[in-house]
Amino acid sequence: MTVLLLLLTAHFIGDFYLQPRAWIENRHARGLKASALYKHSLIHFVLATVALYIAGIGMVSAIMWGLLIALTHWLIDWAKSGHHSLSAFIFDQVAHIVVIVTVSAFITGVTVAQVSEMAAMLIQPDTLLYILGYIVVLNPASILIAQVLARHTKVLASAENQSLGDAGRWIGYVERVLALSFILVGQYTGLGFLVATKTVFRVGDLSKAKDMRLTEYMMLGTLFSFALALIVGWCIIAIVPA
């Protein structure tokens, strides 16, 4: 675990603290010819080597594994060059982390039996129930709320009330995930804080709108959102043994 944590720390420092914005733009603009691509990979080599040496695997081994991490980092960043989307960013980070986890597994001698044991823990009924709970409060809950409010949404659809596209849906995702998390850990104070925070941010919109229909619409959406998170959370708590 120490090796993995040190390598992850080195990765995030190299990717998010020691990579100037100009380097990112240079990589996207020039691809394989970008000098920043090689500078960035060199930084990751140094950081990974230092991290592994601190972990106590020996300088020669640290340099060899550091070179491997730097090379894969170079390949992944080159593949990402020119792609600015969220999916490209997620793919980039997941690919880097997979490499780091794999290297850590080889260095620490993780066996197939240990991997199978960890995988078996993930498919325990209790774990699957928690995963199912989060799946339910995301898209299925979003679709259900949209269906319930469909008639009101049509009434409010106008040029003056245009939103940021999917912003409302993502706000709902985040608030339900947070609400469910607070419920599962028994932190109802956090749930109250979440409700209060959303209310504070909405007060300005409602006072400016001066429209009772918009006020009622937003209250309905918020109440449905939190109600679904509460119901799912309470069901999980009731099923999972204490």
Image (cartoon, grey):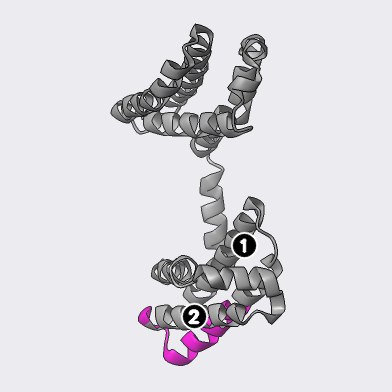
The quarter of the image holding the C terminus is top left
Is residue 110 visible in the rendered image? The answer is no
Name, please, the residue furthest toward the left: 189
For residue 66, above or below residue 92? below
Residue 92 in which image quadrant? bottom right
* Mark drawn on residue 166: none
Tag 1: amino acid: Asp
Q: Residue at x 66, y 15 (%)?
A: 147
Q: Pick the residue in front: 73 or 110.
A: 73
Q: Is residue 31 left or right of residue 54?
A: right
Where residue 39 sits: x, y (%)?
55, 82
Where residue 106 sits: x, y (%)?
54, 74
Name, please, the residue furthest toward the bottom: 60
* Disc 1 and disc 2 in contact, CB within 8 angstroms: no
Q: Residue at x 46, y 83 (%)?
A: 46
Residue picked out by circle 2: 43
| Few, some or many residues within 10 Å of mark 1 (<14, 14–19, 20+) | some
Q: Which residues are magenta?
A: 54-71
Where residue 135 sits: x, y (%)?
58, 33
Residue picked out by circle 1: 92
Q: Residue at x 43, y 80 (%)?
A: 52
Q: For mark 2, give the secondary structure.
A: helix
